[in-house]
Image (cartoon, helix red, strand yellow):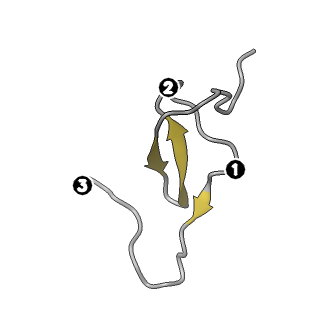
Amino acid sequence: MGDEYCTCNGRTSIYTENDDWGFWDVCCNCNKPVECSYTYFNHYDGEDHCDYDD
């Protein structure tokens, strides 16, 4: 069974992905999420944080 999170040594770069509730960093080397990088959106600030392509 594979690891759920990135275990790369010397990670060179990351990119960000998001969902309806927050965002997280993803390793460009293995395309797995970086552990403990999830950050929740502040849904109480009156802003629309969701990007929908309707």
Q: Which mark is residue 54?
A: 3
Q: Are marks 1 and 3 in contact (CB under 8 Å)?
A: no
Q: Where 52 sits versus 28, above or below?
A: below
Q: Nearer the viewer, residue 49 or 29?
A: 29
Which one is closest to the eye, mark 2 or mark 3? 2
Q: Where 13 sits versus 39, above or below?
A: above
Between disc 2 and disc 1, whose residue precedes? 2
- Residue 49: x %, y % from top left: 41, 68
Q: Are marks 2 and 3 in contact (CB under 8 Å)?
A: no
Badge 3 element: loop
Between disc 2 and disc 3, whose residue precedes? 2
Category of crowding for the residue at label 3, using alpha-carbon neighbours closer than 10 angstroms: few (below 14), some (14–19), many (at least 20): few
**Residue 22 appears in which quarter of the rendering?**
bottom right
Q: Where 30 sits versus 51, above or below?
A: above
Q: Nearer the viewer, residue 17 or 49?
A: 17
Which one is closest to the eye, mark 2 or mark 1? 2
List the residue tagged with mark 2: 29
